[in-house]
């Protein structure tokens, strides 16, 4: 059974940093693309960052220059380093993986989410 488990969320002051992790189990994800999404209360889920199987990265304009997505294939894990956090970054953050996933979608697996709260 495939599982994606996020961790690393929490409460941080504006300007601070957090690193989210998403550990996958149940299969090898070397050939998969990964992504992070987030959903704030009362808002739709939105794309945050995407990394291809060979390490090419893409970011939403709202996080470009502040967030960094990376992957460790040996650990079947993807990370999201979040710096210079703002209150508007407050949301539940989800990781996703898909062998044919692109920026338009196609993710096969999703995590359960981890809460990130940024206080002003």
Image: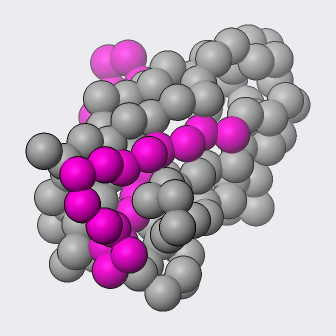
Give the residue at x 59% y 39%.
Answer: 20
> Where 34 falls versus 67 (above or below)?
below
Where residue 28 sits in the image (x, y, percent)? 31, 67
- Relative horizontal placement of residue 119, taking residue 69 as reference (left or right): right
Instruction: Look at the image and tell me whether residue 37 can be seen.
Output: no
Can residue 83 be seen from the camera position used here?
yes
- Residue found at the very far bottom of the displayed protein: 54
Residue at image x 25%, y 42%? 3
Side of 89 where 93 appears, left or right? left
Quarter of the image that includes the N terminus: top left
Structure colour scheme: one colour
Q: Write down the quadrant of residue 43 in the picture.
A: top left
Q: Position of residue 40 (x, y in %)?
A: 42, 25
Q: Residue at x 46, y 25 (%)?
A: 114
Q: Does residue 28 show up magenta in the picture?
A: yes
- Pinpoint residue 62: horizontal percent, then vertical percent: 60, 52
Q: Residue at image x 16%, y 67%?
A: 106
- Above or below: residue 12 compared with residue 36: above
What stretch of residues is rendered in magenta?
A: 19-45
24 left or right of 101 in image: right
Q: Quadrant of residue 34?
A: bottom left
Please state the horizontal and vertical placement of residue 5, each as a whole percent of the image. 38, 35
Q: How many marks?
A: 0
């Amino acid at each position: 059974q495939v599982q994606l488990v996020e961790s690393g969320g929490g409460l941080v002051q504006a300007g601070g940093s957090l690193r989210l992790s998403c550990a996958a189990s149940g299969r090898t994800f070397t050939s998969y693309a990964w992504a992070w999404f987030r959903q704030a209360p009362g808002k739709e889920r939105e794309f945050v960052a995407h990394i291809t199987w060979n390490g090419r990265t893409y970011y939403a304009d709202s996080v470009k220059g502040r967030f960094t997505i990376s992957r460790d294939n040996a650990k079947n894990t993807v990370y999201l380093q979040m710096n210079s956090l703002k209150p508007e970054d407050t949301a539940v953050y989800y990781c996703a993986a898909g062998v044919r996933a692109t920026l338009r979608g196609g993710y096969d697996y999703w995590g359960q989410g981890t809460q990130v709260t940024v206080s002003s």
